[in-house]
Image (spheres, helix red, strand yellow):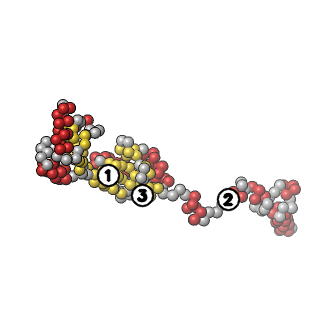
Amino acid sequence: MMLRRLLLLLLLANALLGARQLGWLDGLLGPGAGMREREPQRLEAQVAPEALQILTPAALARRTPPPVCLEAGPLSGAELVTAEAALRQLLPEGGWSQISRERPGSWMVYMGRYTSKATMERRADELRKREVAFEEVRDLPEYEPGFLFGRYTSEADANAARQRLLAQKVRFARVVRLEPPSTTHVLRIPRADAELQQKAAALGELVRGKPLRACGR
């Protein structure tokens, strides 16, 4: 008798569970777990499903900003050491390239400086008689007034020009160095992605007045 009752209870429980899963009791108990997983209720629960997009690798690449070239310079030798130390905060060693440029010096063959206008005019007349080309010095206050016979990028060329003047009996010309030869450096990151660009902007100047900027600016 007891066994028969247990069997009837199990059959009744299975029947109720099946009816619940099939939604026959939703009017009394509300939607069941099975209904919550079915359409269209599940679609209605999604937030803007039409906004979802599946991007291909090519489409993703088009949405990613392209890398850019960044550089800092020109830098002196001392500035180069400081700038490379700052770059190590952004990149591992070898993550940038160094471009060095040799800048030639500047020399001129010069006569002066004259304290008397009369003396200067007399020298100018002598040069014209010897048919020597010259011009007055401009934009070099330290050497004005005086005569300029030419500018040169090597001391040897300037000395050779002075020897030619001596051959023309121009005795008071001399060679003056205006600027010594020098070497400048540029540090370049050829392909900086968006993240590295943001880090470079946050870092600011590598040395005073010389931040990383787009190449060629």
Is label 3 in a helix, a strand or a loop? Answer: strand
Check whether the beta carbons of the residues at disc 2 and disc 1 lie within 8 A of each other: no
Residue at 42%, 58% in the rendered image: 190
Identify the residue position indicated by label 1 in the image: 185
- Residue 142 in sight: no
Identify the residue position indicated by label 3 in the image: 190
The amino acid sitting under disc 1 is His
> Relative to residue 92, is residue 86 depicted above or below?
above
Identify the residue position indicated by label 2 in the image: 52
The part of the image, by quadrant, that contains residue 6 is: bottom right
Q: Nearer the viewer, mark 3 or mark 2?
A: 3
Check whether the beta carbons of the residues at disc 3 and disc 2 lie within 8 A of each other: no
Disc 3 from disc 2: Cα separation:
35 Å
Residue placed most toward the observer, 149 or 57: 149
**Nearest to N terminus: mark 1 or mark 3:** 1
Residue placed most toward the observer, 139 or 48: 139
Query: Residue 31 at x, y = what percent?
Result: 81, 57
The amino acid sitting under disc 2 is Leu
Residue at 21%, 52% in the rendered image: 154
**Nearest to N terminus: mark 3 or mark 2:** 2
Disc 1 from disc 3: Cα separation:
15 Å
Residue at 81%, 63% in the rendered image: 21
Residue placed most toward the observer, 158 or 82: 158
> Relative to residue 45, is residue 179 depicted above or below?
above
Q: Quadrant of the N terminus?
A: bottom right
The amino acid sitting under disc 3 is Pro
